[in-house]
Amino acid sequence: MLRVLWLFAALDAVLLLDTGMLFPRESSSRELKELNGLWAFRADRSPNRNQGFESAWYKSRLAETGPVIDMPVPASYNDITQDPTLRDFIGWVWYEREVTVPTRWITDDGLRVVLRVGSAHYYSVVWVNGVKVTEHEGGHLPFEAEIGTLLRKDPTMPCRITIAVNNTLDLHTLPPGTIQYMTDRTRYPAGFFVQNTNFDFFNYAGIHRPVLLYTTPKAYVDDITVVTDFLDDTGLVRYGVSVKGTTSATMKVTLMDKGGHCIVSSNQASGMLKVPNVNLWWPYLMHENPGYLYSLEVRLKASDASSTSEDVYTLPVGIRTVNVSSTQFFINNKPFYFHGVNKHEDADIRGKGLDWPLIVKDFNLMKWLGANSFRTSHYPYAEEILQMCDRHGIVVIDESPGVGIKDIRSFGNASLTHHLAVMDELVRRDKNHPSVVMWSVANEPAAEMPPAENYFKTLIKHTKALDPTRPVTYITDSNFSRDKGAPFVDVICVNSYFSWYHDPGHVEVIPLQLNTQFEDWYGKYKKPIIQSEYGADVVPGLHNDPPVMFTEEYQKVVLQQYHGVFDQKRKKYVIGELIWNFADFMTTQGEPEL
């Protein structure tokens, strides 16, 4: 009984957000029209980067405002052309595409037509036929707007979509940054400025994930939340369905197995579904049948004086539990060890643009390596990637874009307010993924600064209130005795690069220093520890014996020294190791780090 009551309380907490962001899926009531492909593109190269707004480029075809080029969507714009000034461009860029909308979408005023952008970096403003429909702050997360009413005002007009995107980072964005103007006229031309950041990956920009139109009936399923548990061989699925567009409707909720057979159903908008002989969701290499997913089908019927409509949405559901003790991490009450990697959404030419061949190749490589997990360093990855993780049983530490928070001014109220909003969006989007087992609110912040204590106390408390079913952490490289946020996390995640950034070349000190690191952190906080980054850079094909830095032999010895300590400490309180990095990624230009 207590477990059932906890499930209800946990679901109520996750339902705190007042609107949903369900991944668009086709059904008998919903249609999709992808807008991927070539868009017209123009960078605003005016000195203040504001000519597009001053001249209202959104009011006419973009080609009528000046020269445009072809730009693929989804993709970063940086590496598409041969123009070096566009590769490092900072400011507003403009995208446009004209779309033919199916006639029935326009004539049927019982349909909602929604424009959705999977993500754009960093600040976006969207117009349809010259009318602003939405704006969004932050990359890596989706945003959308209902545009059916606007389209019906003049059904003869084509649907012209204009999206302005600005990649400028300031002290209050996530990630933060600063703009530095160079005023020495003997060295720099007038107006010359650079974007400074405190992270090492390239600041790719543009529309990075699919843009699409989709439809729903006026009365529609706005959100679904599931919280799962099990007792013996019975699965427990506590669900809640949020409905918009009607105050009077009937509903049928059906849970189906992988074969499409009905297991259990309900006619209530919220409740508990009991699943006999449950197939639990297990991680890769932890079970002979990893990544088992049920399907939760919701059928909503609504009627008014003139018509009846039905909305159908199906959500994949994995039944599993996550728990943490002072020494272990449990999935389905079994100890789980994170044997994985850190990644980046990054590839040649397309930058951070969603790329299915690359995604599938990465998953095949990870499973070939024997990896069971990864961290979405250092920002939320595409929903499509998390869906792959769900299906393949790859465990995910889901990280916010809170990387490079090094300036004390980035711990103020404006930054915290935005960070809280980003966590709202992240939890709202990813709460139902069984692969997501932990939230990471930041990577390597200046956690020793005095304001960090209240900042992370508030941020972590807020995230736990949004989702009490998952542990919360952030990734630290601070000294254990000065870290202001560590008391509030559930799992300690530590980055360290012994014999690389410290004592370069002296691999013999790794066991001692790594052991001391673990003992210090566990001795003070009594929480399980993940080595969230470790490794050594290498130039492929470079060899030397005895090993020296940047050779393959040196990298091998560094990893062997780390692994020996991991093998001992995992018997006590170390619960994972995530190597840096899974694959090469683009960085900013500069002198190499040592």
Image: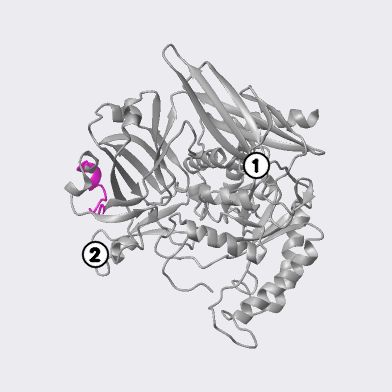
Q: Residue at x 51, y 16 (%)?
A: 247
Which of the 4 image quadrants contains residue 98? Answer: top left
Kind of residue indicated by mark 1: Gly
Q: Which residue is drawn at 62% across and 76% down?
A: 555
Q: Which color mode does the image show?
A: one colour
Q: Dot 1: few (<14), some (14–19), or many (≥20) neighbours within 10 Å?
A: few
Q: Nearer the viewer, residue 97 or 449?
A: 97
- Give the extent of the magenta segment: 42-56
Residue at the extreme top: 305
> Residue 177 in magenta?
no
Q: Is residue 3 left or right of residue 70?
A: right
**Residue 255 place in picture, x, y as percent:** 65, 33
Q: Give the residue pinned by disc 1.
A: 259
Q: In this view, does 376 lie to the left or right of 123?
A: right
Q: Give the residue pinned by disc 2.
A: 189
Q: Dot 2: few (<14), some (14–19), or many (≥20) neighbours within 10 Å?
A: few
**How would you classify the magenta stretch by its main secondary structure?**
loop
**Residue 286 place in picture, x, y as percent:** 74, 55
